Image (cartoon, rainbow, N blue to C red):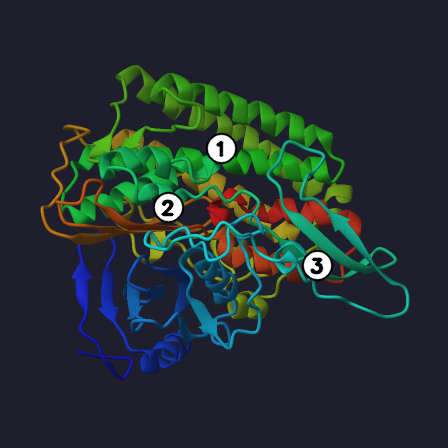
Amino acid sequence: MEVFGLNLTLQRLEAPAPVWRARVTAADWVPAAMVVREAGGRLLALWGGVQAATVCVAYVLADGLLWLELPLPSGQSSYPDLAPVFPAASRMQRAAADLSGIFAEGAQDQRPWLNHGAWPTGYFPLRHTTEASQTFPDALLLDYAFVRVEGDGVHEIAVGPVHAGVIEPGHFRFSVVGEKVLRLEQRLGYTHKGIEQRMTQLPPLQAARLAGRVSGDSTVAYAWAYCMALEAAASCDLAPRAVWLRALMLERERVANHLGDLGALGNDAAFAFGLAQFSRLREDWLRLAKEAFGHRLMMDCVVPGGVAADLALTHITQLSQQCDAIEREVQTLRSIYEDHAGLQDRFMSTGRVSPALAAQLGLTGLAGRASGQAHDLRCDHPGAPYDSLQVKLASQRNGDVAARVAVRFDEVFESLRLIRQMLAELPAGPVRQALCLPEQASRGAGWVEGWRGEVLVVLELDEAANQHRIRRCHFHDPSWQNWPVLEHAIMGNIVPDFPLINKSFNLSYAGQDL
């Protein structure tokens, strides 16, 4: 089949969203990326394989998701660099090098990303057949080469990786003149837990619990994406009520995180009243989730074949009534935020990412929508039940903290509307069915619009003779695209504005460190 001017044999994967897979040659690897970019497509994820060396990439196109796989010849561990075409590929390539031992040939940045110097020489976690030497890397791995900015009055401020609050570790190296930030460079990877290696050691049905713990604030999104990939590999169609309950939980997860962030953003601008009020609303929201679903964050509620438990009729009424109450209070709080001159002075024009820069760097999710990137999987490729709910896209173009706050408010109101509609139209029927895995090797993909943006899970199952069966499972968080953009958002701003800008993105450390 002729695709992008290339002769590709496409395989349509079973999934709620359209997903195609094809193999390419090294000669077609970069040309395919360039044609995707020229067609308005986006890079979603890049990852390495196991055992037999491969590198894979997922592109978002107008028609769906394209999963390309490049097998590397025996003894070869390099492939063409995609960073000049899609800058967001750089860190993904560095992670693939650390995990799979495959390298982007000619890449400008080949510093280790996940390997902080504690791994034995020659150790690549996803290469099961690799014998790791007991000698450790030289000091170059431990002495990370940050980019230096020099000039009159330029100095560095090092922050982290250990922070004052109870937050995940990350190191931020600021180059500043006075308080003006000239450059920010991040070093992450401190929360690498070996999740993708561990997935290959678990039976597929049990691995769903680990998938829901990739990033705790997105447990529903990750669990759904993993189960979607597993169910696609097993050619399993879910009962409608199970799918609607998953979407209901996903929207409640979105509201919970937006409420928390709106309060924290007020607090970072010295408006403690906002933190107090939104924290109260979020606590009420989580308490009812515990009562209705059995867990405040709805962890382990999405399971292979459906959901763990049905909703009681009394809880359906309570959830709907809570949406009405929360909506009234958030409308009042939005008016207070918008009318507060001091708050708006801190929000407006701070941490701006222009639509052009956002498109160039691949900014995605709610941060992307605040910078004119009108992408939302619930609107672009809606699966059930979103195909019948007519989701309204929340979008801004100014790309500053104020715009990201506005998108959060709009998404809260839209999610409340969706939740009420789902509760009113919830189909009858079972909520879970047994999942029968195929005897032969199979593949699946799960693609979900989490509260930060698109969550992708790609899954490869071995044939049934393999004890554990998961050959490869790759998780992708939208933070991969957005962390590098944060480095640009702070440029030209003052150091005290960094916590505010950082919180307006609120990216996941754990989601991209894996």
Residue depicted at x 29% and y 65%: 66
SS at circle 2:
helix
Q: Nearer the viewer, residue 58 or 368?
A: 58
Q: Which residue is mark 3?
A: 184
Q: Residues within 10 Å of mark 2 (few under 14, many from 20)?
A: many
- Spatial distance from mark 3 to mark 1, Cα to Cα? 30 Å
Please indicate, yes or no, whether residue 276 appears anywhere in the rendered image: yes
Query: Which quarter of the figure has residue 332?
Result: top right
Amino acid at circle 2? Gln
Q: State the residue at coordinates (47%, 24%).
A: 286
Front: mark 3 or 1 = 3
Point out residue 433 in the picture as x, y percentages from the top left corner: 14, 31
Q: Nearer the viewer, residue 173 or 397?
A: 173
Q: Nearer the viewer, mark 2 or mark 3?
A: 2
Question: Rounded to the nearest whole Å, what is the CA distance between mark 1 and mark 2?
Answer: 31 Å
The image quarter containing residue 265 is top right
- Image position, residue 156 (x, y; %): 80, 57
Disc number at residue 256? 1
As shown in the figure, which amino acid type bears the numbered disc 3? Leu
Which residue corresponds to mark 2? 197
Is mark 2 in CB contact (under 8 Å) with mark 3? no
Q: Earlier in the sequence, mark 2 or mark 3?
A: 3
The image shows residue 438 at horizontal and vertical percentages of 11, 45
Structural crowding at the residue carrying mark 3, measured as other residues with C-alpha within 10 Å and reported as few (<14), some (14–19) or many (≥20): many
